[in-house]
Image: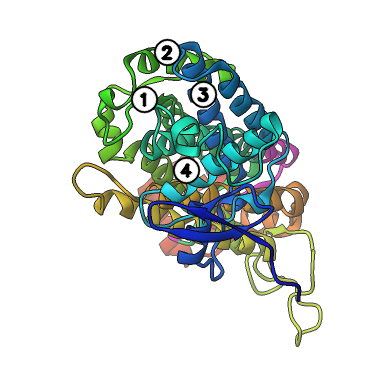
């Protein structure tokens, strides 16, 4: 193998070799050396977060230009570099471990170095690693820091990711409505404590799922809307005087301009933002609750599909793959099982997120990276599981007409008919006297009519 060409860069720790053609620099390289991935994901695996970081840096730079705290030519070079990166994010330039010590500083500096090197190269034809005239800390990081940049970028990333995920939840609800309407004429036995109860239609049954999904969609949307409150300008544990007063006064208008919205506003208390991430944790808690509801739905499908001859056999799921390497003809409910496993995985990630609130100490909760990567992974995992469930299962289910017809003409539904025509006591007496003989019970129903 050819030896990798390198350049030598210097930081406060000392000199270090960096790949010669890389846009990232010494602090990124130091993080690469310190935190090997070992199966975990790099920052590049989370494009929503990178985009959020770039958008925050763009808003900060444009604010610095508007307040004349950065030379216009330098500021424009930074903005041009950011716009270039936003059009096509180079994955190999964001290699740091997605979580690492220091509360996310390696992610922030990775972005700062890439922007600075690209701006110097594009606008001033300077060699990589010289950091002249644009410096990662002095210019790209001007009036912002890891604390407020990462926090704000996390909010942006979650808001962006939620848009697609919410659409998938809406599609799940819509498909249940469509299937309920399609099979509204088919009755099935309901069950309480896994014992026979009364007959209901498939539309009745699916309507409960629809309400659950819609309610969770709305609850999560409410928590997502709270993320429009951000702490940009409240850098270094929330102190407002660590950036200029002019920057603080204008940065939120600039962020709204960059994001093409009017929704973003400053949080009420920047110290709170530094100490706590419960606004993002609230989203994780809602996602966990949604996951548990989806597990219940998918398990219901497994039960209703059980059989084909010795189980419930109430619905037929599409046969998508052989179900056994040893038993011919066996077909398993693999798609509901995939959704269940997706939810298991999501719940584990949500639990990791919730732990970060327990372990934040004093003035700064340093575990933001765990929050954001697990939130994005959770939404990815659930979105994929739900999409697969809709496409390969829910959209093609069919009730077993004969089995369901037989089920609703059994003992308990028949006794309920008699009770509704007479009374609970009378129906109980008939049941006891007839020893559960359906023919005798039905004769009593005819007499009661």
Mark sitting earlier along the chain (2/4): 4
Mark 1 vs mark 3, foreground winner is: 3
Is 315 within the magenta?
no
Return the residue nearer the eye: 101 or 320.
101
Return the x and y of residue 150 as percentages of the image width and height. 43, 39
Q: CA distance from mark 3 to mark 2?
A: 11 Å
Return the x and y of residue 86 as percentages of the image width and height. 67, 34
Mark sitting earlier along the chain (4/3): 3
Return the residue nearer the eye: 428 or 379.
379
Q: Which residue is mark 2?
A: 250
Tell me where residue 337 sits by quadrant. Answer: bottom right
Q: Which residue is mark 1?
A: 233
Return the x and y of residue 29 as percentages of the image width and height. 53, 58
Return the x and y of residue 323 as percentages of the image width and height. 74, 75
Q: CA distance from mark 2 to mark 4?
A: 22 Å
Answer yes or no: is residue 177 visible.
no
Quadrant location, the C terminus? top right
Dot label at residue 285? none
Quadrant location, the N terminus? bottom right
Q: CA distance from mark 1 to mark 3?
A: 12 Å
Q: CA distance from mark 4 to mark 3?
A: 15 Å
As drawn, is 260 to the left or to the right of 293?
Answer: right
Q: Which residue is mark 3?
A: 61
Q: Which residue is mark 4?
A: 108
Mark sitting earlier along the chain (2/1): 1
User: Which residues, given as a range, are shown in magenta?
Assistant: 174-193
């Amino acid at each position: 193998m050819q030896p990798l060409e390198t350049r030598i860069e210097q930081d406060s720790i000392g000199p270090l070799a960096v790949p010669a053609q890389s846009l990232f620099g010494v602090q990124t390289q130091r993080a690469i050396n310190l935190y090997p991935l070992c199966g975990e994901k790099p920052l590049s695996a989370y494009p929503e977060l990178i985009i959020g970081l770039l958008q925050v840096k763009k808003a900060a730079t444009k604010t610095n230009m508007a307040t004349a705290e950065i030379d216009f030519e330098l500021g424009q070079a930074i903005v041009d570099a950011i716009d270039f990166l936003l059009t096509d994010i180079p994955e190999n330039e964001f290699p740091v471990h997605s979580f690492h010590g220091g509360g996310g500083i390696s992610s922030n500096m990775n972005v700062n170095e890439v922007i600075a090197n690209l701006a110097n190269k594009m606008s001033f034809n300077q060699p990589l690693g010289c950091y002249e005239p644009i410096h990662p800390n002095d210019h790209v990081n001007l009036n912002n820091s890891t604390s407020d940049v990462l926090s704000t970028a996390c909010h942006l990333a979650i808001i962006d990711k939620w848009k697609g995920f919410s659409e998938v939840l809406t599609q799940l609800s819509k498909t249940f409505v469509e299937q309920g309407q399609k099979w509204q004429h088919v009755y099935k036995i309901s069950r309480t404590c896994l014992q026979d109860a009364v007959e209901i239609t498939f539309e009745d049954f699916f309507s409960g799922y629809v309400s659950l999904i819609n309610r969770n969609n709305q609850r999560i949307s409410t928590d997502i809307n709270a993320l429009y409150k951000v702490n940009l300008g409240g850098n270094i544990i929330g102190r407002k005087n660590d950036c200029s007063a002019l920057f603080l006064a204008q940065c939120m208008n600039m962020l709204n301009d960059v994001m093409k919205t009017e929704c973003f506003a400053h949080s009420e208390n920047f110290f709170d933002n530094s100490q706590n991430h419960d606004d993002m944790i609230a989203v994780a808690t809602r996602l966990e609750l949604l996951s548990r509801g989806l597990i219940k739905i998918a398990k219901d499908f497994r039960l209703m599909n059980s059989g084909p001859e010795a189980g419930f056999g109430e619905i037929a799921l599409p046969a998508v793959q052989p179900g056994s390497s040893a038993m011919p003809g066996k077909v398993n409910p693999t798609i509901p099982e995939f959704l269940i496993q997706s939810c298991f995985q999501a719940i584990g990630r949500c639990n990791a997120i919730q732990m970060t609130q327990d372990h934040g100490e004093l003035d700064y909760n340093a575990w933001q990276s765990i929050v954001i990567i697990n939130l994005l992974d959770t939404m990815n995992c659930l979105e994929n599981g739900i999409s697969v469930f809709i496409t390969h299962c829910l959209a093609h289910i069919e009730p077993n007409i004969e089995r369901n017809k037989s089920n609703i003409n059994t003992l308990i539904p028949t006794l309920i008919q008699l009770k509704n025509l007479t009374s609970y006591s009378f129906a109980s007496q008939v049941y006891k006297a007839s020893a559960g003989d359906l023919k005798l019970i039905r004769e009593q129903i005819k007499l009661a009519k």
